[in-house]
Image: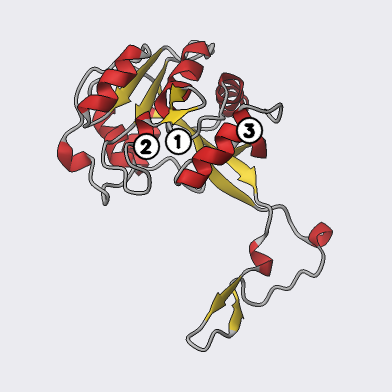
Amino acid sequence: MINGHSILAIIPARGGSKGVLKKNIKPLAGKPLIAWTIEEAKKSKYIDRFILSSDDQEIIAMAKQWGCEVPFVRPRELAEDTTPGIQPVLHAMQFFPDYEYILLLQPTSPLRTHEDIDRCIEYLMENHSESCVSVVEVDKPPYWMYTLDEQSLLHPFVEGMTVARRQDANKIYALNGAIYIAKRNFLLKHETFVTEQTIGFVMDKEHSFDIDTELDFKICECLMKSDEI
């Protein structure tokens, strides 16, 4: 709880991972991937309750083993490849109508810390915003990106804008997938965390890795075993 406001954290973890088999429970630096998020949620100063939303019994058992509450099994129709990410959140919210803020913590961000989580919550409150998501500065702005046509000819991705030097380019940020938080009523109204009223909380690049491939696992494991984070 922060400033008298209650916070429910939801950890979504479906079983049908395509890129990496059983990704959410795959070992990473000695722990299943999902355990890294559960442990940081436990350390937060402001999270009142954190739960798992999953359709997979193996993930559910693993989450319980690491101390995460699992109050329901997610319906299969909300765990398809084509299911919008907000739908499991809205489903979970139905079970907990009394929490004012909803915090989404994806288990694919194992380098995100409880300090990141708490600073994001504080940033939301300080700015009197209804929605905040974590972002990271991109290494290569879209000014230097191109598409290729059928003849392999280059076409600027951002038409009509040329920036020759990096120092002349505006800073560009991308969602890093680590932290999403919004007021309950905001989510019920917009059915998304990101609108024109959403503010961005900037995270360090070292904490912003989003695991999607086997290579991502290897990179994160190397970072965890070094002094980089």
73 over 22 or under it: above or below:
above
**Alpha carbons under labels 2 and 1: distance apart:** 8 Å
Q: Residue type at mark 3?
A: Leu
Q: Does residue 126 appear left or right of residue 215 in this picture?
A: right
**Alpha carbons under labels 2 and 3: distance apart:** 18 Å
**Alpha carbons under labels 1 and 3: distance apart:** 15 Å
Q: Does residue 183 appear left or right of residue 210 in this picture?
A: left
Q: Residue type at mark 2?
A: Lys
Front tag of 1 and 3: 3
Answer whether labels 2 and 1 touch (C-beta < 8 Å): yes
Closer to us: 91 or 61: 61
Label 1's element? loop
Label 3's element? helix
Which residue in the protein does label 3 denote?
Answer: 223
- Between disc 1 and disc 3, whose residue precedes? 1
Residue at the image point whose x is 23% and y is 46% from the top: 80
- Between disc 2 and disc 3, whose residue precedes? 2
Quick one: label 2, few (<14), some, or many (20+) residues within 10 Å?
many
- Between disc 2 and disc 1, whose residue precedes? 2
Residue at the image point whose x is 51% and y is 18% from the top: 40
Q: Residue type at mark 1?
A: Thr
Which residue in the protein does label 2 denote?
Answer: 23
User: Residue 111: x, y in percent?
Assistant: 56, 30
Which residue in the protein does label 1 denote?
Answer: 108
114 over 197 or under it: above or below:
above
